[in-house]
C-alpha cells in the first residue's frame, strides 16, 4: 500500500507501473495481484485508505469543535479549516484524491455499472 501511494502520488495512477509498485514493496507483481486482484483493486484500496485518513481527521476536528461551540456555522468553518490544513500538510495525497475523485475505477464502478442508491452509498462510505 505504501509503495502504491508513493508512486500514485508522484506519477499519477496511469503512470505508476505495477512492476515498480511491487519492487518498492519488496514483492512481485503476482504478490500485489494476490492481495488486490488488479491494479484497479489496488487503486480502490489506496483511494479508500486516503479518504479514511481525511474522514478521521474531519471527525476528530468536528467533535472537538462541537464541544466548544456546536453552532453549525462554526462546524462548517472548522470543516473547511481541517480540509485546507490537511491539503497543506499532505498536498500529494490530496492531489491524488482530487485527480481520482470522479474516477469510476477509484469508486469501484465498471464501465457498464449503473449508479444505484446502494452503489452510491458504498462509494460514499
Image (tube, rainbow, N blue to C red):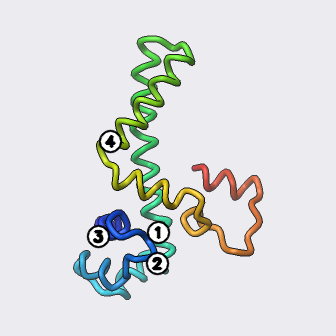
Q: Is residue 3 above or below residue 93?
A: below
Q: Secondary structure at mark 3?
A: helix
Which label belongs to residue 43? 1
In the displayed structure, 88 sits above or below 6; it is above
How far apart marks 4 and 1 lie (CA) works out to: 23 Å
x, y percentage for residue 82? 40, 33
Determine whether the residue tagged by mark 2 lies in a helix, strand or loop.
Answer: helix
Badge 3 crowding class, 10 Å Cα cut-off, few under 14, some 14 to 19, many 20 or more, is some
Q: Earlier in the sequence, mark 4 or mark 1?
A: 1
Please report whichever mark, 3 or 1, sits nearer to the chain's N-terminal start: 3
Tell me the mark number nearer the camera, choosing from 2 and 4: 4
Quarter of the figure that contains the N terminus: bottom left
Q: CA distance from mark 4 to mark 3?
A: 22 Å
Of mark 3 and mark 2, the one earlier in the sequence is: 3
Q: From the top left corner, tell me how far across and down residue 113 is, in percent.
A: 73, 70
Taking 98 as reference, is 29 left or right? left
Quick check: marks 2 and 1 in contact, CB under 8 Å?
A: yes
Q: Which residue is mark 4?
A: 88
**Mark 2 or mark 4, earlier in chain:** 2
The crowding category of the residue bearing disc 1, from other C-alpha atoms within 10 Å (few below 14, some 14 to 19, many at least 20), is many
The structure residue drawn at horizontal position 41% and vertical position 40%, both measured from the top left corner, is: 56
Q: Circles 3 and 2: CB distance less than 8 Å?
A: no
Of residues 48 and 17, the one drawn nearer to the viewer in this rendering: 17
Q: Secondary structure at mark 1?
A: helix
Residue picked out by circle 3: 3
Q: Earlier in the sequence, mark 4 or mark 3?
A: 3
Name the residue beneath numbered marker 2.
39
What residue sits 77% from the left and 65% below the top? 114
Quadrant in which residue 62 is drawn: top left
37, 10: nearer the viewer: 10
| Whole-number angstrom distance, CA of label 3 to CA of label 2 | 13 Å
| Eye-nearest disc, 4 or 1 | 4
Amino acid at each position: 500500500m505504501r509503495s502504491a501511494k508513493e508512486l500514485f502520488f508522484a506519477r499519477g495512477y496511469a503512470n505508476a507501473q505495477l512492476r515498480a509498485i511491487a519492487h518498492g514493496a519488496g514483492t512481485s507483481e503476482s504478490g500485489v495481484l494476490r492481495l488486490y486482484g488488479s491494479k484497479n483493486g489496488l487503486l480502490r484500496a489506496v483511494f479508500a485508505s486516503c479518504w479514511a485518513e481525511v474522514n478521521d481527521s474531519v471527525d476528530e476536528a468536528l467533535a472537538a469543535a462541537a464541544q466548544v461551540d456546536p453552532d453549525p456555522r462554526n462546524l462548517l468553518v472548522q470543516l473547511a479549516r481541517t480540509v485546507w490544513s490537511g491539503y497543506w500538510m499532505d498536498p500529494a495525497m490530496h492531489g491524488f484524491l482530487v485527480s481520482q475523485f470522479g474516477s469510476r475505477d477509484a469508486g469501484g464502478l465498471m464501465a457498464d455499472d449503473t449508479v444505484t442508491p446502494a452503489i452510491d452509498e458504498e462509494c460514499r462510505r
